[in-house]
């Protein structure tokens, strides 16, 4: 039996029960009612957001000055906004943008966080110390402050927003990855691999990655929810996605005006509901995943 | 013992230096001429005077030299002029805003701790009851709603419709100071700020409490005939609360973030409002000054919690 | 850290353990308002010499020599009880009213002489500097009489004087002109002659004034006036609806919230502000007139006025909308995207800029303008001009465009407004090459010789009837050369609580000044 199969770390215990830890985790996950509810919310949202140009007749940015501030009608299911843009189209496009920003920034911070954490863990004392001091520093500043500072330099738009959010999110992950891998570093199979002259790439992808998979998955979900909230917050302050591009955050910004808040709830409530529902769903899923990956759950 | 403190202090000092380098680099990355920060926008200077100032500030020197000059000025309290406000220096502006932000944050945090710990204990004791599940869902809902949305709705319902609270600001303009007035203005934004963190504390408290409740010594206590209430309060709570207290230190940063949105919606005259406005107008001296000050604050708080925790729990020093 | 900051912090800490509200305060009659909300206001500016806006508030404690009446139709006395203009239009004689400064000193002709000379000095950064260039000398005939001599006739002079707040020579003479602009005195202890006296400014929060009991117009009916600052107009509206303030400016799309509500009075008025899309002449985007024409043809102004402004705006084809100033045969720049596309093609827009984003800044930081700009943005996008709107607050906007070292790339395009009445000559300030900063407000660096000539001729014309034709020429030149893309003149609104009695406000450009008679304002309990 080779020691460096992907599931190496938990291999001993898993075989004794006849199912892999991943299978058991999935089993636990699917027994979690809240997590299933989360999936049941998230999947339709994703589908709607991805496919809307095929089934919805309005484009999100086309204005219609003859139909301003209309309430829900047969033509505009959710009404129109202050320049006559279709609210449903903007809601769906806004969802696309919000989810796009969240997923890309999560992907980037996963990559950076994993690599930094792994390199710190395997790279020796000096490198580790330097990297970790840097991570400490990045974690010192409150995220929203850092977000504002970076946004003031990069300006507004999709790419700057992605850049800013991903730059901000990786340090926590790299800490967790490092902690996990430090435990692992002294294990026999890693020492053995090193002894056989395995390169860093081999160490990273054959050992580090599989062994921190659970951390990565849980982190990704939590961070996904976070990124959606961060984007919304930035756009609400007028520093993330700026109109005419739609995002859930900048649709909610319209509610700052008492007229919109009070007289045109159809312009902001859908965005608010979609945002809260999506984040809630992801948080449920994230919680389900955390419990599922935590072997202690079974004992409770 | 002393060695440990010195080590922590040295680490804190390193962090401060690193922070100052970071802020300096960000300041130089920001668009515009760095000399603008040191010019009073309302006092025109001639080219000769500008060159002299540039030289004095070392802006014609390489970056490391510039950094030292900037650091020296910053240590002396000179963070330059606000670009946006005529003739206003950055530091006094920041100092003025620190109080309101601290007041809002600490009140919110205190409310959150009380609320969160109480809810967490109830949830843990009545595990899986309707109350527990309800609180859990509520906490999720609160965590999943953006701070600004809660603030907007809170403002609308409680200030505009019900008129229970003022719509914004910290004190009634022009009225002589009174504690009641302050509290009237503080309650709504602080409660909204507290909402988020109480949800966070509740979840930690609940799981920490559940772990403690399962411990043997509690079973022993129960077996000895100690009443259930006493078990929970005297034994379980004391042990469960420790990890939650450490959480408080590490959430200061998040609290500052949340405060920004609350301040922005409630026109609260704090650091957050100042910073948002500065970002809007690209007032870099103020942005970086605020960042530096907040960073220093967070580092100091972390350092203090570290040291204080070491005093409380000597085991820390070993690890 | 200075001693002052320490002391402030200490006082703050002491106050925290403070007392209950004193009964004296509860009995004081106070009017609180958002007097600096909206485009006519300028929060945080206290120096009347450098104030492009904010006169609603400034004129509660400062006063000019002459001012407009509340309808903005004619000039009425303020600190000058009466005035005479000589036949040759070269000599203005002002008879001054009896008044004292807030510190008790007598107001005299010497103060007027001091103020005019101070404003004329460009070192003070006064916005009036260029507007007073025709002033040759100021003579004090006696303590109540002052004569202003001009080197050439200047019709706009008397209008410029409505914006010139008279300042106390005894308090300011010691300050060097170049230190005037940044002097802290403006926001700590300014001395005026108006019905209210300055008490204090709490940074970014509010300004408090107290009644000037010896005011010549009578003792003010309320004890205190408070100008509360707001981060945005929405916050001001919330405060108004929560009953915390009694007055604020509102946008036209906020009007429905108050319409039909017995508790509020909506005040509507023509703004006398021509809104325009301003082309920064220091960026190489707009040099070709065909590009500017294309912008005009690409925008469907009629529909925007009908829908977004709900008809409460007038389309403008030059800087004026007043019927008598409009010559025949103006190009109406009808909505014609095809023509716009063609013009852009001829001008080679592809090479000039193509679809690169162009930052389009404004100080109209409100939802209505955001919608208007979004509509324009989408119309311009149709013809291939990619503009990106960005709304700043007034101070931020002024910081960029009126900066000592402006960076044209920060404002290649603006959406702004310029006062076009009651005196049509005010357009000169933003359009004439002679008004390029620092002396004037032509921050777009418009340099059109034909326009300069037309403006100079109109401003210098002393005969009323002839002046009208000359302003028609200005209109025709503007229409032809497109120094900016003039859009419309919109109505503006304010809302006052019905508790306010005898409250006078009008949406004057820059907030006034006009004869608001703040001493007569009162408030029902």
Image: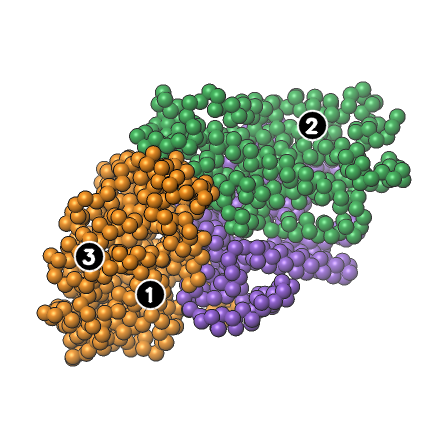
Chain colours: A green, B purple, C orange
Residue tagged 1: C439
Q: Position of residue A131 (x, y in %)?
A: 72, 49
- Separation (CA) of disc 2 from disc 3: 76 Å
Residue B315 horizontal/vertical position (percent): 77, 50
- Tell me if C299 is positioned left or right of B147 in this view: left
Residue at mark 3:
C423
Q: CA distance from mark 3 to mark 1?
A: 20 Å
Q: Nearer the viewer, residue A79 or C516?
A: A79
Question: Horizontal placement of C466 versus B108: left or right?
Answer: left
Q: Quick one: label 3, few (<14), some, or many (20+) residues within 10 Å?
A: some
Element at badge 1?
Answer: loop
Q: What is the chain identity of the residue bearing mark 1?
A: C
Residue at (41, 29) in percent of width and height: A87
- Which x, y percent locates residue C225? 28, 59
Q: Residue at x 69, y 27 (%)?
A: A292
Marks 2 and 1 sit apart, C-alpha to C-alpha, by 71 Å
Which callout, 3 or 1, points at the residue further toward the start of the chain?
3
Confirm whether residue C493 shows in the render: no
**Vertical arrangement, residue C386 with respect to residue C124, above or below:** above
Q: Chain ID for label 2?
A: A
Q: Residues at marks 2 and 1, common chain?
A: no
Toward the viewer: A204 or B289? A204
**Residue labelled with disc 2:** A292
Residue B120's quadrant in the figure?
A: top right
Q: Quadrant of residue A286?
A: top right
Q: Quadrant of the N terminus of chain B?
A: bottom right
Please say if the residues under marks 3 and 1 sit with CB atoms less than 8 Å apart: no
Which of pointers 2 and 3 indicates the residue nearer the eye? Answer: 3
């Amino acid at each position: 039996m080779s020691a460096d199969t992907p599931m190496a770390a938990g291999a001993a215990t898993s075989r004794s029960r006849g199912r892999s830890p991943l299978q058991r985790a999935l089993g636990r996950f699917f027994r979690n009612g809240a997590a299933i509810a989360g999936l049941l919310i998230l999947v339709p949202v994703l589908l709607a957001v991805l496919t809307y140009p095929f089934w919805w007749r309005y484009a999100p940015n086309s204005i219609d000055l003859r139909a301003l501030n209309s309430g829900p009608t047969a033509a505009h299911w959710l009404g129109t906004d202050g320049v006559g843009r279709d609210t449903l189209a903007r809601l769906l496009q806004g969802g696309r943008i919000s989810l796009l920003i969240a997923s890309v920034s999560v992907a980037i911070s996963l990559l950076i966080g994993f690599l930094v954490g792994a390199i710190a863990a395997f790279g020796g004392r000096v490198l580790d110390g330097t990297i970790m001091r840097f991570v400490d520093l990045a974690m010192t500043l409150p995220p929203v402050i850092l977000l504002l500072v970076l946004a003031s330099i990069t300006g507004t738009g999709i790419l700057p927003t992605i850049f800013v959010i991903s730059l901000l999110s990786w340090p926590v992950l790299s800490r967790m990855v490092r902690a996990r891998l430090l435990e692992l570093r002294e294990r026999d199979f890693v020492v053995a691999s090193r002894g056989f002259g395995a390169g860093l790439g081999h160490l990273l992808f054959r050992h580090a990655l599989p062994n921190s998979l659970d951390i990565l998955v849980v982190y990704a979900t939590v961070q996904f929810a976070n990124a959606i909230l961060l984007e919304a917050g930035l756009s609400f302050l007028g520093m993330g996605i700026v109109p005419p591009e739609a995002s859930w955050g900048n649709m909610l910004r319209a509610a700052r005006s008492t007229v919109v808040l009070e007289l045109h709830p159809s312009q902001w409530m859908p965005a608010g509901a979609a945002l809260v529902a999506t984040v809630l769903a992801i948080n449920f899923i994230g919680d389900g995943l955390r419990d599922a990956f935590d072997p202690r759950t079974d004992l409770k | 013992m002393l060695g440990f403190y010195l080590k922590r202090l040295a680490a804190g000092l390193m962090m401060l230096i690193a922070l100052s380098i970071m802020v300096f680099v960000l300041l130089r990355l920001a668009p515009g001429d760095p000399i603008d920060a040191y010019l009073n926008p309302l006092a025109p200077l001639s080219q000769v005077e500008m060159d002299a100032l540039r030289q004095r500030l070392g802006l014609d020197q390489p970056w490391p030299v510039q950094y030292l000059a900037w650091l020296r000025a910053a240590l002396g309290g000179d963070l330059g002029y606000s670009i946006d406000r005529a003739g206003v220096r950055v530091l006094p502006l920041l100092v003025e805003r620190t109080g309101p932000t601290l007041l809002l944050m600490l009140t919110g945090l205190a409310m959150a701790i009380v609320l969160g710990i109480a809810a967490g204990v109830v949830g843990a004791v009545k595990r899986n009851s309707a109350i527990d599940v309800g609180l859990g869902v509520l906490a999720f809902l609160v965590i999943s709603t953006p701070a600004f949305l809660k603030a907007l709705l809170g403002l609308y319902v409680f200030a505009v419709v019900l008129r229970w609270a003022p719509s914004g600001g910290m004190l009634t303009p022009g009225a002589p100071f009174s504690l009641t007035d302050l509290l009237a203005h503080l309650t709504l934004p602080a409660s909204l700020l507290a909402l988020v963190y109480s949800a966070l504390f509740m979840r930690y408290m609940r799981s920490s409490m559940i772990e403690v409740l399962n411990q043997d010594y509690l079973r022993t206590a129960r077996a000895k005939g100690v009443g259930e209430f006493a078990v929970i309060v005297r034994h379980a709570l004391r042990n469960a609360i420790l990890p939650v207290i450490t959480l408080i230190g590490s959430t200061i940063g998040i609290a500052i973030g949340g405060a920004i949105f609350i301040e922005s919606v409630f026109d609260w005259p704090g650091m957050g409002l100042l910073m948002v406005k500065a970002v809007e107008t690209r007032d870099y001296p103020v942005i970086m000054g605020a960042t530096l000050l907040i960073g220093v604050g967070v580092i100091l708080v972390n350092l203090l919690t570290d040291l204080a925790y070491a005093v409380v729990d000597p085991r820390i020093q070993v690890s | 850290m200075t001693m002052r900051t320490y002391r402030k912090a200490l006082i703050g800490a002491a106050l925290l353990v403070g007392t209950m509200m004193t009964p004296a305060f509860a009995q004081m009659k106070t009017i609180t308002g958002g007097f600096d909300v909206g485009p006519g206001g300028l929060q945080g500016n206290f120096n009347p010499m450098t104030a492009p806006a904010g006169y609603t508030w400034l004129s509660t404690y400062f006063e000019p020599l002459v001012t407009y009446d509340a309808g903005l139709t004619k000039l009425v006395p303020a600190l000058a009880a009466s005035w005479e203009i000589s036949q040759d239009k070269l000599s203005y004689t002002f008879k001054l009213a009896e008044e004292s400064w807030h510190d008790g000193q007598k107001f005299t002709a010497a103060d007027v002489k001091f103020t005019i000379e101070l404003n004329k000095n460009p070192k003070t950064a006064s916005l009036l500097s260029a507007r007073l260039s025709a002033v040759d000398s100021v003579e004090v005939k006696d303590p109540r009489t002052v004569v202003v001599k001009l080197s050439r006739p200047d019709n706009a002079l008397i209008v410029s004087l409505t914006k010139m707040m008279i300042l106390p020579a005894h308090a300011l003479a010691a300050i060097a002109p170049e230190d005037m602009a940044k002097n802290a005195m403006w926001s700590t202890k300014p001395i005026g002659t108006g019905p209210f006296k300055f008490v204090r400014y709490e940074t970014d929060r509010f300004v408090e004034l107290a009644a000037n009991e010896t005011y010549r117009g009578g003792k003010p009916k309320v004890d205190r006036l408070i100008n509360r600052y707001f981060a945005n107009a929405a916050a001001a509206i919330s405060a108004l609806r929560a009953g915390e303030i009694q007055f604020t400016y509102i946008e036209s799309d906020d009007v429905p919230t108050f319409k039909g509500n017995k508790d509020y009075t909506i005040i509507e008025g023509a703004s006398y502000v021509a809104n325009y899309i301003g082309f920064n002449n220091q960026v190489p985007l707009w040099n070709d007139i065909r590009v500017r024409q294309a912008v005009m043809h690409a925008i469907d102004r009629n529909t925007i006025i009908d829908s977004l402004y709900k008809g409460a705006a007038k389309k403008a084809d030059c800087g004026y909308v007043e019927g008598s100033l409009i010559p025949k045969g103006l190009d109406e720049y009808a909505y014609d995207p095809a023509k716009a596309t063609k013009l852009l093609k001829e001008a080679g827009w592809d090479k000039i800029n193509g679809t690169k984003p162009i930052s389009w800044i404004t100080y109209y930081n409100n939802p209505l303008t955001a919608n208007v700009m979004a509509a324009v943005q989408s119309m311009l996008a149709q013809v291939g001009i990619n503009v990106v709107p960005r709304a700043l607050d007034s101070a931020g906007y002024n910081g960029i465009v009126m900066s000592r070292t402006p960076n044209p790339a920060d404002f290649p395009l603006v959406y702004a407004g310029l006062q076009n009445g009651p005196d049509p000559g005010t357009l000169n300030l933003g359009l004439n090459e002679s008004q390029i900063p620092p002396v004037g407000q032509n921050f777009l660096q418009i340099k059109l010789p034909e326009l300069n000539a037309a403006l100079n001729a109109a401003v210098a014309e002393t005969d009323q009837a002839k002046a009208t034709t000359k302003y028609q020429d200005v209109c025709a030149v503007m229409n032809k050369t497109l120094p900016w893309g003039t859009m419309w003149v919109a109505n503006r609104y304010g809302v006052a609580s019905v508790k306010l009695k005898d409250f006078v406000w009008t949406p004057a450009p820059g907030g006034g000044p006009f004869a608001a008679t703040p001493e007569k304002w009162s408030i029902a309990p």
